[in-house]
Amino acid sequence: MEHVSLLIKNARVFNSYLKQFIPADVSVLDGKFYYIDREQSAAFSAEKTLDAKGLYMLPGLIDIHMHIESSMMTPGPFGRFLASCGVTTVVSEPHEMANVKGMRGILEMIRTAEDAPVDIYYGIPSSVPSTNEELETTGGIIRFQEMKHLMDEKDVICVGEVMNYRQIIRENDLDITRFIKYLQQEHPGYVIEGHCPSLVGPDLAKFLYLGINGDHTEHTLEEVRQRIENGMFMEIQDKMLQSDVLDYIREHRLYEYCCFVTDDTMADVLYKEGQLNSVVEKAIRKGFPAEQAIYCATYTPSQRMHLYDRGVIAPGKLADFMLVEDPSRLSPTVVYKNGQEIFSRGENHAQVYVKDSFPEDFYTSVQLPALTEKDFQMPVSRFLPAGSPVPAQVTVRVIEVHADRTQTTEKLVQMPVRNGYIDWKSSGCLLAMVLERHGKNGNIGYGFLTGTCLKEGTAATTWFHDHHNLFVVGDDEKDMLFAVRRVQQMQGGFLTVQNGAVLSELALPVCGILSDQPLQEISARLCRVRESLIHLGYQHNNPIMSLGTLGLPVSPALKLTDHGLVDVSKGAVAGLLAE
């Protein structure tokens, strides 16, 4: 009688090659699947026997495009929570941390993930800053040499999303361009992830020609069609679970060319709904076949990332799996990693919370010059050429927020000038500012907001993609100054303010973007911030993400950084005053 480490009896096992469930017993030897016994007749002695009692046995889920920083958790606790979601492997791209602390930030994220019960791999941040130093100020910069160095880290397996997609397809001297040329020569076939919303036709072909052949961003059906037709691997996140896109994949049986990912899952959503398991469930509810959905959350992502040792229940593959009662509802009863149990529903998992520790300066990253109310006033002379006469009114470029997307549009608004100051309060717009907080130059970028954003009150945050400078928007200068000082006191975070009082707040003291508290606490506080934003008039399907991406200068169309308004299509700073 052969001896194995673990024997799972009476399971309905997902066969990735047939894309169907088959009754079988499964044996595990030294952390890997040994034999899938369809006859259920093989005689094994096992150190441990698990009777599945007819439950469905699935490979552990694999999320190949996500950012731990979006959860606002640190890697260790994040990895421990993933186990409860049936997720056993993720590929995280730490460009948020890199934007604050550069190479040190990336290495600290890798270090603190080492004790997680699941596998946390990393992508090389390829666009830090996301554009260039003329458009945004970051705490860290990742150059060509840093990218090469990161390839030597054992848990780094790909190039993270190339976000400056408009620049890279033109003649340029970008570090990522140099790195891609290096990879083509020295490491052909190395996985390079992309970020190219709205790119089509010849421009898309130029992007693909460079070897950047994966994309996870939001697209129309036509953009999806062009990507798949041209050999680009599609990574489908929550906001891309659109019926026309899912139907197109299903009708043309394009399952080999896509997978599901989470990209950004914030703490309150993570705590209430789960992680990749939640995205897969939603796809199934929208008509995506359950077996194909499981396939696109296990097998295809493993192939995309060259993780050929997992993603399937077959001899020699890592024994990463979960048991569920219903394959359309991925709420695991038990989860195993490398043949060892890492989660069991109903067991008391209460334990002393273990914080990840970071270097001391990671907790003092919000460095601002002394500010007064004058910094929050809008003298028109600040935006006019020296010596220009003061006009009676000005036409102002305003960022218009929309309820159904993080992309913005530019709106031109007439504002009167009174006593030399722009009278914005009578315009129906809010004042917005980005304050450089990495201690480099003290820049302040000024702008205005309208649309489905706040209607009253003030909001401030350092969780502000990707440069993570301090953003504040509001209807009252005193409240805005109060909010900025409070964020600095917390050393980063989110808060809402009205009439000199804090309505809600979440401290993010680790580099201004992460909390060292348990997920339940982060979730509760973030939920209150979300509710407060909505109470103040913010109308959006995700007001936290909408607010947090108003400074992302690679996401169309008008954004605000510490350098001022950025015209994303032109890749240039645009004056506040329209000509």
Image (cartoon, helix red, strand yellow):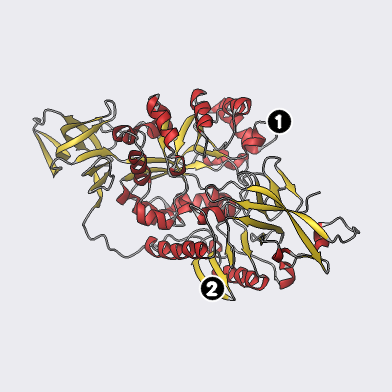
Closest to the observer, 335 or 33: 335
Instruction: Please provide percent x and percent y for residue 306.
Output: 41, 31
Locate residue 118 relative to residue 315 in the image: left or right: right
Residue in front for this viewpoint, 231 or 31: 231
Q: Secondary structure at mark 1?
A: loop
Asked whether residue 509 is in view, the answer is no
Q: CA distance from mark 2 to mark 1?
A: 49 Å
Q: Is residue 94 above or below residue 254?
A: below
Image-based side of 378 in relation to 19, left or right: right
Q: Position of residue 503 (x, y in %)?
A: 51, 71
Q: Answer few, some or many: residues within 10 Å of disc 1's Cα (few below 14, many 20 plus, some between 14 and 19).
A: few
Q: Residue furthest bottom?
A: 500
Question: Which mark, by number, is residue 502?
Answer: 2
Quarter of the image with the N terminus in it: top left
Does 201 sit above or below residue 241?
Answer: above
Does residue 39 show up?
yes
- Residue 89, quarter of the rendered image: top left
Q: Residue 529 has which mark?
A: none
The residue lying toward the viewer, choosing from 11 and 239, is: 239
Other-residue count near label 2 (Cα within 10 Å), few / some / many at <14 / 14–19 / ≥20: some
Of residues 53 and 389, the one drawn nearer to the viewer in this rendering? 389
Is residue 509 shown left or right of residue 336?
right
Image location of residue 376, percent across then percent down: 71, 67
**Rendered residue at 62%/62% (across/down):** 473
Circle 1 residue: 171
Give the SS element for disc 2. Answer: strand
**Which residue: 64% across, 59% down?**
438
Residue drawn at the location 24% of the way across and 33% of the way down: 14
Percent x, y of residue 32: 25, 36
Q: Earlier in the sequence, mark 2 or mark 1?
A: 1
Looking at the rendered structure, the kind of residue marked 2 is Val
